[in-house]
Image (cartoon, rainbow, N blue to C red):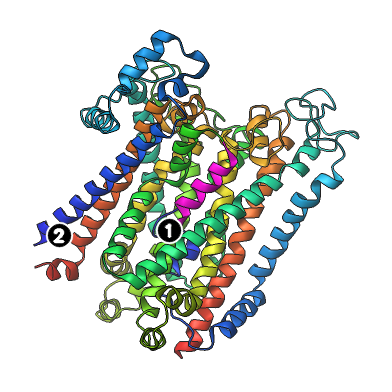
Amino acid sequence: MSDQTVDSAVDLALEQPVKLVEAAPARARFALLRDALRLGRTRFGLAVVGVLVLVALAGPLVAPYSPTEFVGIPNSPPSGDAIFGTDALGRDVLSRFLYGGRTVLWLSAAATLLGVTLGVVVGLIAAYARNWLDDVLMRANDVLLAFPQIIFVLLAVSAIGPKLWLIVLTVGLTHAPRVARVIRGAALEVVERDFVKSAEVVGEARWRVVFAEVLPNVTSPLLVEVGLRMTYSIGLIAGISFLGFGLQPPDADWGLMINENRLSITVQPWAVLLPVIAIGLLTVGTNLITDGVSRALAGIDRRADS
Amino acid sequence: MLTRLILRRLALGLLTLWLVSLLVFAATLALPGDAAQAILGREATPERLAALRDQLNLDEGVVSQYIQWLGGILTGDLGNSAATQAPVGELLSDRVGNSLFLVAVSAAVAIPLSILIGVWTAMRRDRPVDHVVSTTSLILASLPEFVIGIALILLFATEVVHWFPAVSLLGPGEKAWDDPEVVVLPAATLVLAVVPYISRIMRGSMVEVLESEYVTMATLKGLPRRTVIWRHAVPNAIVPAIQVTALQLAYLAGGVVVVEFVFSYPGIGAALVEAVGNRDMPVVQAVTMLAAGIYVGLNILADVATILVTPKLRTAAR
């Protein structure tokens, strides 16, 4: 779960400037996804993520109890009434687990969307401007990059309070400079190409050149960034909720469940195990998909080179 | 010229830190209404309010508040904790030591281990062991630290074997190095979190070096394999790994927050979590500035180290 220039095993692939496929971008993107789907790891990742999303979305419909209902004595072991036993307050572990996945999923998706959108806009503008504006944007990037992501979120939480919108906003904001750097790197090569120059000569508006000519040519690294940021968003947001600054009791949430039951881990491990396994599988799943896409990308590059 | 390159890098780092300080200071302005009232909340008594207002210089303008705050930080006066009224410096000094100890132990294990794994897998490129290591790395790199930490607790501190304490029970004033057992699992968590990144870049650069002409040359000269690898290849392959290692160490400044909380380890990370819960802004600001300072400092160090060990940059600067 880390950071900065080299964000992950997957990110390493992007350290070399991404070679772009010269074919029509739309077709290249399609080929990329098709190649990615041929890889076992992509399929496995998709299956794992699919199951967990289903659990999170449909869970509340099949949960045997309400997530806040007291069904037995605290920390009782699995029984016929409560398949995974009860939690530290005597609520049904399974029901709280089935209710607890929604928040982390939608918060992570929203933070990823915000971070990637901001990062793409900043990265493209910086690459295209390459004057004082580039310098200003990159300096602002450096300032945000100087905060470890979780510390930036905690700073905001201590000033404003544990609000869900604030977590989405700050996680997105800390993603943005990291995305911007990758997109700027990829776009620097594109803005030098002939079709960008000719669009300028024809007199297209600058925002149109940036978003209609440059953007479609950086979609490959963009796809990888979306996957990567989603993996980190899940880890960060589940972590913040585990620290107690996400969804507040008595609501059910995977991160919060771990926090509430970690001290009784020896007597009732299920209340910790279920959410830990779910969060772990979710991040491994999204990263496997991302790795599949970036491998497919590397394969296409190799063929384009030869 | 070389010094100028390094000085320029230093100046840029200081500029970044100054901008960071503006942002950290601005967090107090985001407190709703009167900052002193917001910090003290229900515990506000007229005396405590007045004391805090005075400490934060709330009667003066924003600019003067900022200058006094920054001056305090630069001279080591971090203000008083809003929760306990104790000076922040006193509150954090023991904990900074504990966190540094944790990070130092983690780095001392993680860096040599990553280099070994990187070299080893590069030499067995595309063989089964390379694939196994790369898949394991990918999985470990995906997992949030608290998931790794709790898995280690379940494996080594409760269910399977009970070798290490699940939580760090240290008396007040007791240092982590007085009872090194408490550092094992938190450090192992951090090691597992950073090794995948460093070993991966080490492998990549080692693969490149192994294919280079001077390694072939050294082999053809008849040098023993061991000498070729450790004397000729590894020192060159390490250069690209310097930056990543520094970034990973800087990343530990954030990683300790969750890991210390998982193990109740008495460091600045756990202190930060507690302070956020109490909305204890002076403590939060101090820890945040410290983390940013470590990040910027390590980055400067990595850049300088890279400049010094890269012959091309060294001569280009002349």
**Mark linked to residue B5:** 2
Q: Residue at x 50, y 65 (%)?
A: A10
Q: Mark 2 falls on what kind of element?
A: helix
Q: Residue at x 41, y 85 (%)?
A: A199
Q: Which residue is mark 1?
A: A178
Q: Image quadrant of residue A41?
A: bottom right
Eyeballing the image, is A226 above or below A102? below
- For the residue pair B224 and B91, the one nearer the viewer reads as B91
Q: Position of residue A163 (x, y in %)?
A: 57, 37
Q: Position of residue A226 (x, y in %)?
A: 55, 63
**Which stretch is magenta?**
A163-176
Q: Amino acid at mark 1?
A: Arg
Q: Would you say the magenta stretch is mainly helix, strand or loop?
A: helix
- For the residue pair A70 and B246, the one nearer the viewer reads as A70
A170 part of magenta stretch: yes
B13 part of magenta stretch: no
Eyeballing the image, is A138 above or below A165? below
The residue lying furthest to the right in this view is A80
Eyeballing the image, is A253 above or below B121? above
Q: Amino acid at mark 2?
A: Leu
